[in-house]
Image: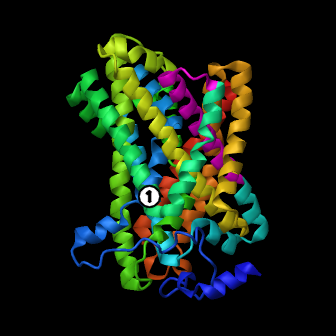
Amino acid sequence: MAYWTCRRSLPALIPMAATNARTIQPIEPSLPEVHSTVRLSSSKIGWRRLLGFLGPGFLISVGYMDPGNWATDIAGGSRFGYTLLYVVMLSNLMAILLQSLSLKLGVATERDLAQLCHQEFGRKASFALWLAAEIAIAACDMAEVIGSAIALNLLFHIPLFYGVLITGLDVLLILLLQRRGFRYVEALVITLIGTIIVMFSVQLILSRPDYAVALGSLLIPSPGIVTNPRMLYIAIGILGATVMPHNLYLHSSIVQSRKYARTPEGKREAILFANIDSAMALTMALFVNAAILVVAAAAFHSRGLLQVAAIEDAYKMLSPLLGASFASTLFAVALLASGQNSSITGTLAGQVVMEGFIHIKVAPWKRRLITRSIAIVPTILVVAITGSQGTEKLLILSQVILSLQLSFAVVPLVKFTGSRRLMGEFANGKLLQRAAWVTAALIVGLNAWLLVQTVMSA
């Protein structure tokens, strides 16, 4: 009863159909506490309007530089030097495309991806998709827990077991910031991203890479990526772990937090500025991932250390190899910032999928505790039994679980954004739709291949 009362009392929050699309029954938006709450400048100067839209893209970008990606970047750089930088670039371009589709879906239909899946596929299919999304979010949160715990161990020598428990306290910070306003959450995320960028900028200077070779590898693919089986495996690992499925659900929701005019003109402006926000943020993610790989190539590969893949090993070797006692500390601080950043987006994504798929609203603090508990319990058990070796295996497992779920988010996204019935005038053109399907097929296929190879090797 309260749900319907809320719908009647919040007419400004009830989304309408996209322009020229069929009439859709009104529904309360996900994350109603932040929906259309961020005010925009009334100035006609473009950059001032753009500043109001900056934020959602940065929340999304943290999923592309989370601890789960560090292992593949470190392994790629230590084993094959700068060669796989092209794969990092290619994966980032695919991410920009899919996140662009996600934000356009949210603005055009005034629904998020989870809500549209519920609307188009029905209750039973939505429930199955919700379970898959929850498993993926828990798996991603597991990677953040492990990354943060490892960082605390490296920085303060806190045992992994207690480090895992400490990571559960970040829920208090997130809830405090959400109460003060969504802009505070975005400000924290941008600050942590800035911290990561500064840390790795210093690392790049200290490692003294061959910038000319690195730039060439970034823009020109090497035949060895396809012909060398070991290189191909890591390349697919980088590509396969690029797009986080919950980011597609989340972006389509939080892009609606801006108070833009819900008119065709207002939506066109929102899509334009949101795309700029997303592209800027993902370019920073590209820098971080490329920097991790370049540092590994310059510090390890150039010295013949070709088997460095574990995060702890990289930490221990950086300072003596680079000749700077603080190099390892910078690395660990960046890892801690990465883990905390990704935890924030995991919480918000959990709210979006629960409200969108099965229309159940849970208080943010309860939602956060549920997600973190699911991630902490298996991590504590593994750490208690096997120690640090088990955490590496859990990181790999988390990426495999994400690979399993990805197609259930990418395929509906491409299908919906190509539908004129749902998107109206904002539907993908033929060329864009073909590019989207090719990207989706490539990512889904590579994830499936990586999954098969991981299972076979295990």
Residue at image location 51% in from the left, 79% down from the top: 420
Residue at image location 52% in from the left, 77% down from the top: 109
Query: Which quadrant is the C terminus positioned in?
Result: top right
Identity, as a three-letter code, of the amino acid under mark 1: Tyr
**Label 1 element class:** helix
In the image, residue 133 lies in the stretch drawn in magenta: yes
The magenta segment:
132-160
Compared to 253, does 457 lie above or below? above
Residue at image location 59% in from the left, 88% down from the top: 23
Left or right of 229 in this view: 458: right
Residue 38: give x, y in percent of width and height.
42, 71
Residue in front for this viewpoint, 451 or 399: 399
Compared to 303, does 227 lie above or below? below
Residue 117: give x, y in percent of width and height.
65, 68
Residue in front for this viewpoint, 319 or 310: 319
Pointer 1 local density, CA inside 10 Å: few below 14, some 14–19, many at least 20:
some
Residue at image location 28% in from the left, 33% down from the top: 201
Is residue 289 at all visible to an observer of this figure?
yes
Q: Quickly name the residue at label 1.
A: 184
Residue 152: give x, y in percent of width and height.
53, 28
